[in-house]
Image (tube, rainbow, N blue to C red):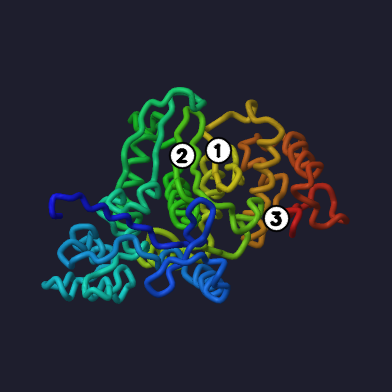
Amino acid sequence: MEERSVVLLEVGRAFRHPVQFQGVEYIRVGTYKKKLKDHPEKERELWRIFDQVPFEQMIAAENVPGPDVLKLIDHTAYFELLGLPQPENREAVLETLRSDEMIIQAQSGQWNITNLGALLLARRLSDFRVLRRKAMRIVVYKNNNRIQTEREPEYVKGYAVGFEALIDLIKNLLPVNEVIEAALRKTVPVYPEIAVRELVANSLIHQDFFISGAGPMVEIFNDRMEITNPGAPLVRTERFLDSPPRSRNESIASFMRRVGVCEERGSGVDKVVFQTETYQLPAPVFEQVDENTRTVLFAPRPLTRMDRADRVRVCYLHACLKYVNRDFLTNTSIRERFGIERDNKAMASRYIREAVEEGKIKLYDADAAPKLRKYVPFWA
């Protein structure tokens, strides 16, 4: 401009805490930049806003022209997911997206794309600066450790419009077993597809988006797969199976339920445990690692290679699953779960005793005869 360079410095919208520079918090008062500590009434108001505005309602892209909104947002997939006819003109499409809070009208007359709209419907999450690290990361390792990476395919689409493609991608990366039935050879997935689907959906929906520089992740090893999302769990990990559903991100969870990706009634972990029992896999691990939530699914492993911790975890989750279905853990049910022969009741009794000694399950009726003993989780 007049043969001189002009630099525009944009200070991003504050979220979760006030904007700082060299340790000092600032706020704009009128047309002036002021130190926040000199305006305590505005600081109180600012913190109230932080407490009230969920991440989904914050803005991913501001002042976007209508045509560009439809380039960034996969509106065609949006209508397909909801089973709705797509309007013939752009204004009607934008109005529908606005009514679902995917976009909001900007004061300039253009459009702001909300985090909700971008996370669910983005053609490429990398098009939104604040959401680049929120795309699902998938890593396949060569062995059972993180030393050597074999593949790291890129996945870029929004959670709702790209969920089925994401599951297909993960399925194609997972190992399979070959079995022969009726003289025909066929491949069988090592991990139950329903369990993988539920855990991937949970990692997307229940993450803490305010943790910057981190996103959901699927790691595939020879003997296990680990699914991690940012954010400490909202309930104790040992109570995942029976606790009422809770979500940090209600709008995302609601939309994913509407399009059939997940359920809000909290039965996802039940399905995971049930599927691992059906496949006779080692029980999954639900754990908190620093400020992250991680679930581990294990590949098939013979009973002879399971240690005490594995057996106790199997008994505990088996008791939880039985209890939420108004049933009990018994010697018979444990034999079925482990695939133990009927005449080897002593082995099943030993595994039950290990779980009791660890305090994970307890006897339901102390007066019952040994053959009629039933067990429930320690918290029942």
Identify the element where label 2 is drawn: loop
- The first of marks 2 and 3 along the sequence is 2
Residue farthest along the right direction in this orientation: 367
Image quadrant of residue 356?
Answer: top right
Mark 2: few/some/many CA within 10 Å (<14, 14-19, 20+): many
Q: Indicate the amino acid at tag 2.
A: Tyr
Q: Nearer the viewer, residue 118 or 377?
A: 118
- The first of marks 1 and 2 along the sequence is 2
Identify the element where label 1 is drawn: loop
Residue at the spot 59% in from the left edge and 54% down from the top edge: 233
Q: Nearer the viewer, residue 313 or 48?
A: 48
Residue 262 horizontal/vertical position (percent): 43, 60
Pointers 1 and 2 in contact (CB under 8 A)?
A: yes
Indicate the quadrant containing the N terminus: top left, top right, bottom left or bottom right: bottom left
Pointers 2 and 3 in contact (CB under 8 A)?
A: no
Q: Indicate the amino acid at tag 3.
A: Phe
Q: Is residue 16 visible?
A: no
Mark 3: few/some/many CA within 10 Å (<14, 14-19, 20+): many
Q: Which residue position holds label 1?
A: 281
Mark 1: few/some/many CA within 10 Å (<14, 14-19, 20+): many
Q: Which residue position holds label 3?
A: 328
Alpha carbon distance from label 1 to label 2:
8 Å
